[in-house]
């Protein structure tokens, strides 16, 4: 497992270039915010493709990301450039498993903890499920929250993470962010950037 971990981390060679955009932000909650949340929460199944960049104090790299969500079951594939590494993350309400390119597999009830143990990198998988839909993590408090001039979620701090999301697009009637910048409040050297290239809600 250590070999697989180091091989995967060693694949972090090329940083994804994705600067955050400056735009006006509003601290007052939009009048239709509850309706937006209710509508976006109905999006429970999707397929998407994106580009994920991770930078730590000592290394950084980028991955192709493929995410399939079917209600409470999901599958996330991360592919490093030039075949340098791959990882499959599969989860449901019972827990999550991570399988590396060499065939080794581990299971845990906590997706974020397992990903960090396998790769040595923190990634808020549980948070991303909701942030991808332009909404805070459900059932958890959030602060430092702001919206853009269109009433779409722009920035928030939640569960130890600081998130900025922008470049919203209409996808089958859902207003969804396509660009994310994520930081860990207690680890300012960790920066995560995610650009969504293709969004496809599923019935």
Image (cartoon, rainbow, N blue to C red):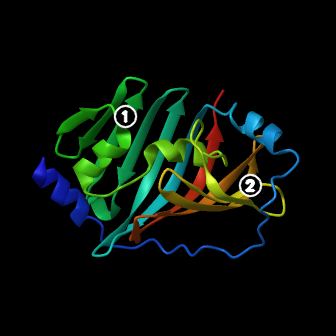
Q: Is residue 169 above or below residue 25?
A: above
**Looking at the rendering, which quadrant does residue 91 occupy?**
top left
x and y, in percent, of residue 174 in the image = 75, 43
Disc 1 secondary structure class = strand
* Residue at disc 2, secondary structure: strand
Vertical order, 31 against 63 (above or below): above
Horizontally, residue 52 falls left or right of residue 176, namely: left
Residue placed at 52% from the left, 34% from the top? 69
Q: Is residue 46 left or right of residue 4?
A: right
Is 176 on the left-hand or right-hand side of 66?
Answer: right
Q: Residue at x 76, y 35 (%)?
A: 39
Mark closer to the chain start, 2 or 1? 1
Measured as percent of width and height from the top left, residue 153 is found at: 71, 55
Q: Is residue 130 above or below residue 15?
A: above
The numbered disc on residue 90 is 1
Which mark is drawn over residue 169? 2
Query: In the rendering, at what x and y percent does residue 24 appear?
Result: 78, 72
């Amino acid at each position: 497992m250590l070999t697989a971990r180091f091989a995967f981390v060693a694949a972090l060679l090329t940083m994804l270039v994705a600067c955050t955009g400056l735009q006006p932000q509003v601290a007052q909650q939009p009048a239709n915010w509850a309706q937006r949340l209710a509508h976006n929460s109905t999006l429970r199944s999707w397929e998407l493709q994106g580009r994920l960049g991770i930078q730590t104090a000592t290394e950084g790299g980028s991955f192709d990301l493929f995410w399939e969500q079917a209600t409470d079951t999901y599958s996330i594939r991360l592919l490093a450039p030039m075949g340098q590494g791959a990882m499959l993350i599969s989860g449901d309400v019972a827990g999550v498993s991570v399988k590396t390119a060499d065939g080794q597999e581990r299971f845990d009830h906590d997706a974020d903890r397992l990903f960090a143990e396998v790769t040595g990198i923190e990634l808020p998988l549980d948070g991303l499920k909701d942030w991808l839909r332009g909404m805070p993590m459900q059932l958890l408090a959030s602060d430092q929250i702001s919206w853009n001039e269109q009433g779409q979620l722009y920035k928030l701090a939640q569960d130890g993470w600081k998130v900025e999301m922008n470049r919203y697009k209409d996808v089958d009637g859902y207003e969804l962010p396509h660009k994310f910048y994520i930081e860990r409040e207690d680890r300012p050297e960790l920066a995560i950037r995610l650009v969504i290239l293709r969004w496809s809600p599923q019935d």
